[in-house]
Amino acid sequence: MLARAGIEQRLTEVRQRITQAAARSKRDPSRIRLLAVSKTQPISVIEEAYGAGQRVFAENRVQEWLEKAPALPDDCQWHLVGRLQTNKVKYLDQNVAMIHSLDRFPLLETLNAQGERRGIVWTTLVQVNTARDPAKAGLMPEEVPDFLSSVRECSHVRVQGLMTIGALGASATETQGFFRRLRELRDTLQSRVFPGVDLQELSMGMSQDFELAIEEGATLIRVGTQIFGKR
């Protein structure tokens, strides 16, 4: 486990790198949100990050979110970034700020049904497999327009952007290309009207490549190892 000073220092370094990457691409660093990916981390370590000023956290698994969220202060914001199983949706509530992995019609339908039943409008991102990696989830880019069109029938789901994950083993140049494709797809789709859809967010970039993602327009970056150390 890292000492508190270690987490504070790592967070400071990550924030500095965010600022530098934003400057290189002539972007406003305040437009980029850092998600501390706390999967598999104990509550005590997340509390250390909180003590160092971090307020936005991300979990991969619903069960971990259920265990950790009640133990942290109420001003924490929680995102779900892992693949969401339809049978886990019933465990979610309005304390989930954003679901990053909306990637298939059954999940869209389940979220809408649960939201209607419980009076919740879910904020989501559509996951896109820009790398066309068979090992990764996500819609193919050409499938996204039809999927966004279907959101009009789901009044309890709001899509606020797109998300992608780079391919394992890809070079930096290839990875930056995957991120660029997501931004270009978003820019193309913004010229069309999709009820219930506002494509303002791009969730892309993790510990090993978040600076490349920022240079390509990321508004949400998902960083775990660079903050908490290796699991």
Image: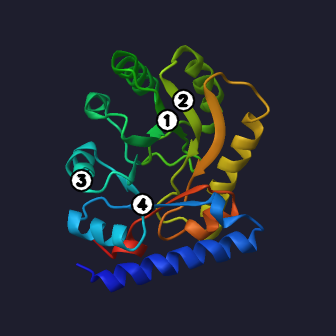
Residue at x 60%, y 30% (from the top left corner):
143
Residue at x 33%, y 61% (from the top left corner):
38
Q: Quadrant of residue 213?
A: bottom right
Give how far apart the Cα atoms at labels 4 and 3 are. 13 Å
User: Which residue is the extreme one toward the front?
Assistant: 74
- Secondary structure, mark 1, is strand
Q: Which residue is mark 4?
A: 55
Per the rendering, the mark at residue 123 is 1
Task: Report the amino acid beneath label 3.
Answer: Lys
Counting labels gives: 4
Q: Are marks 1 and 2 in contact (CB under 8 Å)?
A: yes
From the top left corner, tell me how far across and down residue 116 is, in percent.
40, 16
Q: Is residue 206 above or below residue 152?
A: below
Q: Earlier in the sequence, mark 4 or mark 1?
A: 4
Give how far apart the Cα atoms at labels 3 and 2 are. 25 Å
Per the rendering, the mark at residue 68 is 3
Local packing at callout 2 (Cα closer than 10 Å; few below 14, some 14-19, many 20+) is many
Which of pointers 2 and 4 indicates the residue nearer the eye? 4
Give how far apart the Cα atoms at labels 3 and 1 are. 20 Å
Q: Which residue is mark 2?
A: 158
Task: Report the amino acid beneath label 1.
Answer: Thr
